[in-house]
Image (spheres, coloured by chain):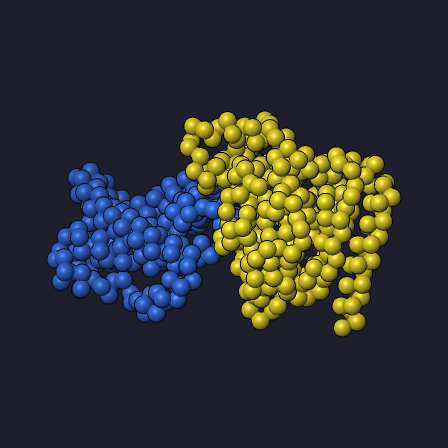
Amino acid sequence: MAPAPAAADPVLAASGVSLDLGDTAVLRDIDLVVARGEVVCIVGASGCGKTSLLRLLAGLLHPTAGAISYEGYPVRRPRSDIAFVFQDYGRALLPWRNAAQNVSLALEAIGVPRPARGKRIEELLHKVGLDGHAEKLPRELSGGMQQRLQIARCLAQEPSVLLMDEPFGALDAMTRQALQDETLAIAAASRASIVFVTHDLDEAIYLGDRVLGLAGSPGRIGETVAVHLPRPRDQLTTRENPEFVRLRRALHDFIGTVQSDRHAR
Amino acid sequence: MKAQRRRLGFNWRGLVLPLVFLLSVELIAMASPIERDAFAAPSAVLAAAIRTLHSGAALRATSETLITAGSGLLLGFAIGLIGGIPLGLFRRADQLMMVPLESLRPVPPVALIPLSLLIFGFGYAMEIAVVAFAVIGPIFLMTRSAIRGIEPQLMEVSQALGLGLIARVTKIVLPAILPRIFVAFRIALGIALVVAVTVEITANPLGLGYAMTIAQQSLQPDLMFALLLWIGLTGWSLNALLLRAESRLFGAAA
């Protein structure tokens, strides 16, 4: 059961995980250990099982073989220490509840009594920069604000792990960069670990302590890249760092080989 | 000025044909003053309507019909909603109930009138039972399909947040299907009125349907037509009331 790589203070681990959905093999022999406070990014071509891996880690899917464990305990269903940020914020928020009430849903789920909710909601909305928008319905908020709201709802659970499924994929470049920095700041402040799925290599390197490249179908971990870029990171200087450029080249080559392999087959 | 009138949504031209029709019927009635069983002059119908409304007979019959239709509607609606929720949520419950439900569906509700009479005898209870039976089926199906139509992502969100079954139903499922359930309720109201009046015409000595049967049997076509118009008006106003509430509550969502 002991995870193979020596990780300092492991929080979430997948060991020997495989997943079949119907007759389709989706993932094979995934070993992954996420340390406390670590940001792990998962990249890969679409359809390689990135999202399925994230769902497995969340307990939303069950592995066909192998096991997921949180602090040594098996993960069989979603738990409040692990929060999931869905890709499609527009459909993950309750359209009939305003911003404050959407955050409240998470507090209700973990059984926070009503009188204690108001102040918590206010703090959470402040944390994601949505002060003054508490009464607005999701459809009255911009895409970036809706995703901020979903993040606030996840933070309401006070999770140790944030699982994020291409959360900024649909946003414009400026908003995306702002949210990347906010996510890093929030994670640093709360010591939460993040597993971040994206198909944007730059985003993965910018955010991650480690970048995993998923390959092929069924998906396997084909490449692990440690990112030794100084923190706090900065949208300009970090991206100009030669190390950043080198890593991007390495990952780009990896994804390229995977795809040409697939075409060759 | 012209645009404003259009916005008010009242088109006088729509009244031309009905008025011409009523006028010609009136003229025909004046031209051939022979009594006929299935025919009454509009003026006579109007007079009969005023008479029966004034005497309170029509209002009493209306309240009887509305009480039975309303109770049956609420009963059937509650049963259909509570039963439809597990069918929509759990595939296994749905598979289990498929055969019994599909075999009950072709039974016309009014075919239960004799059975209901045997069980309850004449009166409110038998009529309420038949109305409720008629309403349950459609509400069942509409609840089920409304739940199937919920954004799947929302169900996953509730799972990820760790909401229990009751919280999931009250916080996600019910609010999500509310607009469609409201439409279902409005449709069910129409069914309830039709079935209630049918039961009254065929069996139960209560309400507007019975009053119409009496008018017909005592050869009072003017009163019969008056009641017919009154039933139409009642159903139309109830539906309009619900439509109004619907657009007020849900706006474009409904």
The chain whose colour is blue is B
The picture places residue A148, in percent across and down from the top left corner, at 62, 37
Q: Nearer the viewer, residue B220 or A198?
A: A198
The residue that appears at 72% across and 48% down in the rendered structure is: A210
The picture places residue A263, in percent across and down from the top left corner, at 78, 69
Tell me if A226 is positioned left or right of B64 in this view.
right
The residue that appears at 78% across and 38% down in the rendered structure is: A230
Quadrant the C terminus of chain A occupies: bottom right
The picture places residue B181, in percent across and down from the top left corner, at 41, 49
Q: Nearer the viewer, residue A260 or A6?
A: A6
Q: Nearer the viewer, residue B7 or A81?
A: A81
Quadrant the N terminus of chain A occupies: bottom right
Residue A56 visible, this angle: no
Tell me if B230 is positioned left or right of B93 in this view.
left
Quarter of the figure with residue A143: top right
Tell me if B160 is positioned left or right of B106 in this view.
right
Residue A125 visible, this angle: yes
**Chain A on-screen colour:** yellow
